[in-house]
Image (cartoon, rainbow, N blue to C red):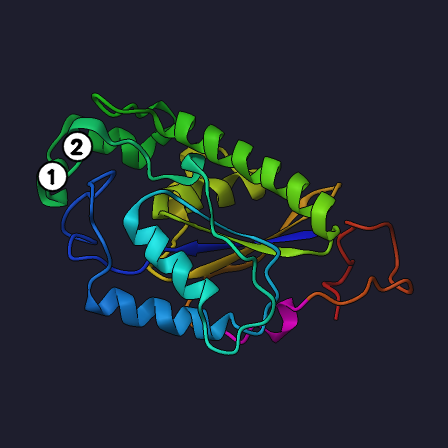
Amino acid sequence: MTTLLLVRHGLTELTGPVLAGWTPRLGLDERGRAQVRATGERLAPLPLAAVVSSPLDRCLETAAALLDAPGAAARPADLAVDDRFGEVRYGDWTGRPLKELAEEPLWKVVQTHPSAAVFPGGEGLAAAQHRAVTAVRDWNARVAAEHGDRAVYAVVSHGDIIKAIVADALGLHLDQFQRIQADPASVTVVQYTQVRPFLVRLNDTGGDVAALVPVPSDTSAAGAPGDAPVGGGA
């Protein structure tokens, strides 16, 4: 039951009013740096088998805060970077104010039928979901092979990418992914089993993480590994 922590990067000066996309050399602002320090400290009790990041600066800074958190449990020696966790390639929409983009005909497609949305000069949301989910499956297999199937690892990525991964984990069509929220510096937790993924936490910005620390398998538990407990469990 490999556990994936999906961490969204902290705030930048563009987060909110502007669609940042793959804007180069865009790091965290003062608010974002404070956010990711707090997130790093909050996740410090968790041993992480790997920390994987989007190649964009705002994610690299956020990932560094996870690796360098004071008093952190075991951490990998190096940060891994995987382009497949990079932001959606918004093409010609990159760097434009959201208020302006809301007037574009494509905006309504993104809101109501995102699986059909393809950004001019960029990629489609369906293609972005496919590359991100493929990356998750690759990293699940790699982490389990190297550290055991109860290992925990973190991926630092972007709002729409995290929402797309969560939609896949929930078995939702991509057209429903706008119902999911992933705030800056939030933590979303998905546990993957051979039977199904379990969404353990969503958009968590302040919860205790003690329950996420790996423990030996409970041999007294009813059912096969990956079965959902009837009644909800303890």
Q: Does the magenta-highlighted stretch encompass residue 97?
A: no
Task: Quickly name the residue at label 1.
Answer: 96
Q: Amino acid at mark 2?
A: Trp
Left-right relation of 158 to 40: left
Q: Secondary structure at mark 1?
A: loop
Q: Position of residue 120 (x, y in %)?
A: 21, 22
Total marks placed: 2
Instruction: Please give the residue where the numbered disc 2 appears in the rendered image.
Output: 93
Question: Is residue 212 magenta-colored?
Answer: yes
Q: Is residue 80 above or below residue 123?
A: below
What amino acid is at disc 1?
Answer: Arg
In the rendered image, the residue lying farthest to the left is 100
Which residue is most to the right? 220
Residue range (magenta): 207-213
Q: Residue at x 35, y 31 (%)?
A: 114
Q: Position of residue 31 (x, y in %)?
A: 23, 69
Residue toward you, 71 or 125: 71
Q: Are marks 1 and 2 in contact (CB under 8 Å)?
A: yes
